[in-house]
Image (tube, grey):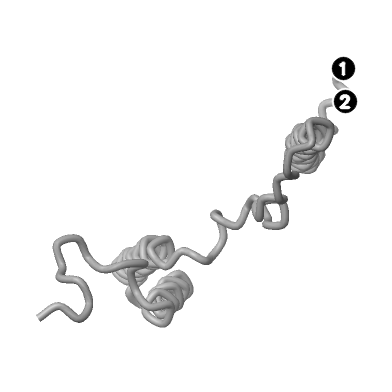
Amino acid sequence: MDNLHHFFPFLIPIVAIIMGIGIAMLGLVLDYRKKREIYSLHHKERLAAIEKGLEVPALPSEFFEDGRKGRRGGDPLRALRTGLVWLFVGVAVIVALFFTHRETSLWAWGLVPTAVGLAKLLYFKLAGGAAGPAPGSPPPGAP
C-alpha cells in the first residue's frame, strides 16, 4: 500500500474528468429519452386520430425548438439581472483587490467581470428593455 501512496494525487484529476464527462453524457442521454418519449406519444396520438377519421393535429412548434432556449439569451430581463450581478461582482473585485494590493495593478483584473456586466446591460438596453409595459403604466396611445 505504501508504494501506491504517490499515485493518489493523480486520482483527483482523473476522477474529476471522468465524472465531468459522465455527468454531461448522462444529461444528453436523459434529454434524448425525454424527447423520444414525447415524439412517441405524439405519434400515437396522430395514429389514433387517423384511425378514428379525425383531423390530424399539427405538430407543435416546440418540436422544432431547442429545449434549452430559455437558459441562454432571448430574455432581456435575464440579461438585466445577470448584467447587474456581473457588474457588481466586478466592482467588488476591483475594490477588494485595490485595498489589499494597493501598490500593484492587480485590481485591474476586476475589469473583466465588470466588462461582462456592462455588455449584458448594453444587450438589455438594445433589446428594448423590459418585455412589456411597466405595471400600472398607461397603454400606448392613451392621453
Determine the residue positioned at 84% across, 32% down: 51
Q: Most extreme residue toward the left, as rendered?
A: 143
Q: Most extreme residue toward the right, as rendered?
A: 3
Q: Secondary structure at mark 1?
A: loop
Find residue 129 and report its image quarter: bottom left
Residue occupied by mark 2: 4
**Percent of width and height locating residue 119:** 45, 78
Q: Specify the amino acid type for callout 1.
A: Met
In this view, 65 is above or below 18: below
Quarter of the rendering occupied by the C terminus = bottom left
Q: Are marks 1 and 2 in contact (CB under 8 Å)?
A: yes
In this view, 71 is above or below 22: below
Find residue 141 and report its image quarter: bottom left
Q: Front-most of 125 and 3?
A: 125
Q: Front-most of 43 and 92?
A: 43
Examine the rendering and report whether any part of residue 18 can be seen. Answer: yes
**Percent of width and height locating residue 117:** 41, 71
Q: Most extreme residue toward the front, as rendered?
A: 53
Q: Would residue 17 appear left or right of 65 to someone viewing this image? A: right
Instruction: Name the mark on residue 1.
Output: 1
Quarter of the rendering occupied by the N terminus = top right
Q: Specify the amino acid type for callout 2.
A: Leu
In this view, 31 is above or below 79: above
Q: Residues within 10 Å of mark 2 (few under 14, many from 20)?
A: few
Q: Front-most of 56 and 15?
A: 56
Q: Secondary structure at mark 2?
A: helix
Find residue 113 and report its image quarter: bottom left
Q: Residues within 10 Å of mark 1 (few under 14, many from 20)?
A: few
